[in-house]
Amino acid sequence: MSQPQTLGNGQNTSWEKFWYVLGCIYFGAYYLSKVPAKKALSEYGLVEMTSAEKFWYVVLCIFVGLGYFNKVIMKRALSEVRFAAPQAFAAPAGQPPYGA
């Protein structure tokens, strides 16, 4: 079972780090898969994209809209997050409950 994480404080296991690096080496597939998700997060004001990420997002959009359509999926998931009941999430030890 995975541990709950907070935005900005998430941690990857050593295996997740290994597979991400391996996926990036293989034609940059993991990196290019991350770009549309990061674009969606940037539109919510949660992250800033680097100039390289902005460039690759445009390239992905030109390539049959791949970047745009993947971003739409991520934005849909993010739009559902704000409707989650605050009681459904436990606060980390020593912190007040979410929504309090």
Image (spheres, rainbow, N blue to C red):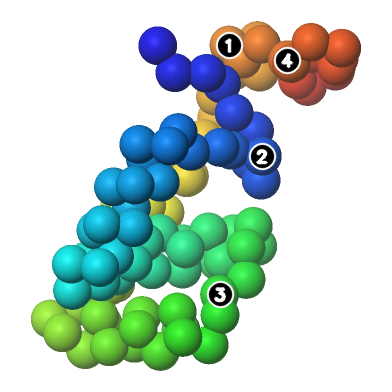
- Circle nearer the N terminus (2, 1): 2
Image quadrant in which the N terminus is located: top left
Name the kind of residue labelled 4 in the image.
Answer: Ala
For label 4, the crowd category at 10 Å Cα-Cα, with few meaning under 14, some 14 to 19 and many 20 or more, is some
Q: Nearer the viewer, residue 10 or 86?
A: 10
Q: Quadrant of residue 10?
A: top right
Of circles 2 and 1, the one toward us is: 2
Q: Is residue 80 above or below residue 34?
A: above
**Taking 82 as reference, is 16 left or right?**
left
Real-space Cα distance between discs 2 and 4? Answer: 14 Å
Real-space Cα distance between discs 3 and 2? Answer: 18 Å
Q: Is residue 36 above or below residue 59?
A: above
Disc 2 designates what residue? 9
For label 2, the crowd category at 10 Å Cα-Cα, with few meaning under 14, some 14 to 19 and many 20 or more, is few
Q: Residue furthest left?
A: 64
Name the kind of residue labelled 2 in the image.
Answer: Asn
For label 1, the crowd category at 10 Å Cα-Cα, with few meaning under 14, some 14 to 19 and many 20 or more, is few
Q: Is residue 85 above or below residue 19?
A: above
Of circles 2 and 4, the one toward us is: 2
- Circle nearer the N terminus (3, 4): 3
Real-space Cα distance between discs 2 and 1? Answer: 19 Å
- Say which residue appears at 34% left-offset and 58% top-offset: 21
Q: Nearer the viewer, residue 43 or 33?
A: 33
Whether label 3 touches label 4, CB < 8 Å: no
Real-space Cα distance between discs 3 and 1? Answer: 31 Å
Disc 3 designates what residue? 49
Position of residue 37 measured from the top left corner of the image (x, y, whole percent) = 40, 59
Please say whether residue 72 is visible from this viewpoint: no
